[in-house]
Amino acid sequence: MSASTTASCPILTYHSQLLFGSDYANNSHVALKDDLARVAASGRRIVPLPQLVEALAGRAAMPDLDRVVCISFDDGPDFDWLDIDHPEHGPQPGFARILREHWAAHPEASPVAASSFVIADASARTAISRSAMDGHDWMHDHWWRAAQDSGLLAIESHGWDHRHEALGDGSDPQLGHFHAVDDETSCRFQIDQASAHIAALCGERPRLFAYPYGQTSDYLRDEYLPRFEHRHGIVGAVSVEPGYCHPHSSRWFLPRFVHAAHWQTPEQLGAILRG
Ligand SMILES: [Zn+2]
């Protein structure tokens, strides 16, 4: 079914805060619902991202990568889990409801599971939400444990504070990018501290890390994450470079396709799924 000679699996990524209208390209909830149906029709089945990473690490059987797809969500807004009555665009089903309803409509499929990459620090979440979401507080952690327990969403790490530019007054050159997380102290702060805090709130330690802004230092990717795996427990990390996962992909910088950035129409998603 794939034109490629190497087995390849796409990781599809959505932002539940992408809610600027009611169309596929400007409403990620519309897109996710449509895309799940397209995935089901494509012959690929959804496998949890940690399962793919464990296979790349040689600790689990490798699925047929031409027959699977993984799904992830970034930043952890409340609408990953909760329905929302959006002040401008009306009621929207949360991502979890969309996953649950898709599974109910396709009971023959394996359980649908996505990975939700959340930001650990509550004060950072408040600042980011208010600056990026029109002043709303839409990035809470009270739903993490229920989401983790549901089996629908695995709560994973997007770092301590995302090094988000909303955290400062514009004068701190360390904010707005993640390249400067390049020594053991800053890596411990962003990785180990975040994982311990997320584990305390959701009941399970994150296994995956999504690089904020898709950016990493060579040190974090090539040394810190692999060398201290026994301590931080992260087994793989994802970027936002478009591309497919292959049997020999590095599990420390996996590519992902991002809705709205890398595909804007159902047809373009169809082409990604064909490989
Ligand atoms: Zn992010």
Image (cartoon, rainbow, N blue to C red):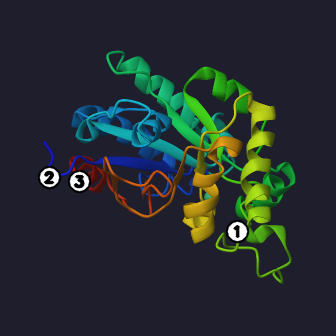
Percent from the top left, x then y, of residue 54? 46, 37
Q: Which residue is mark 3?
A: 271
Query: Where 53 falls versus 129 (above or below)?
Result: above
Residue at mark 1: C-beta within 8 A of ligand 1? no
**Which numbered marker is on residue 181?**
1
Residue density around tag 3, few if under 14, some if 14–19, many if 20 or more, within 10 Å? few
Percent from the top left, x then y, of residue 124? 82, 57
Three-letter residue code for mark 3: Ala
Locate residue 262: give its quadrant: bottom left
Residue density around tag 1, few if under 14, some if 14–19, many if 20 or more, within 10 Å? many
Question: Separation of disc 3 and disc 1 at Cα?
Answer: 35 Å
Q: Earlier in the sequence, mark 2 or mark 1?
A: 2
Three-letter residue code for mark 1: Val
Q: Which residue is mark 2?
A: 5
Q: Is residue 173 visible?
A: yes
Q: Earlier in the sequence, mark 2 or mark 3?
A: 2
Three-letter residue code for mark 2: Thr
- Are the two marked residues, 2 and 3, in contact with CB atoms closer than 8 angstroms? no
* Foreground of the two, 226 or 64: 226
Residue 136 left/right relative to 100: right
Query: Where 180 falls versus 263 (above or below)?
Result: below
Q: Residue at x 43, y 64 (%)?
A: 241
Q: Earlier in the sequence, mark 3 or mark 1?
A: 1
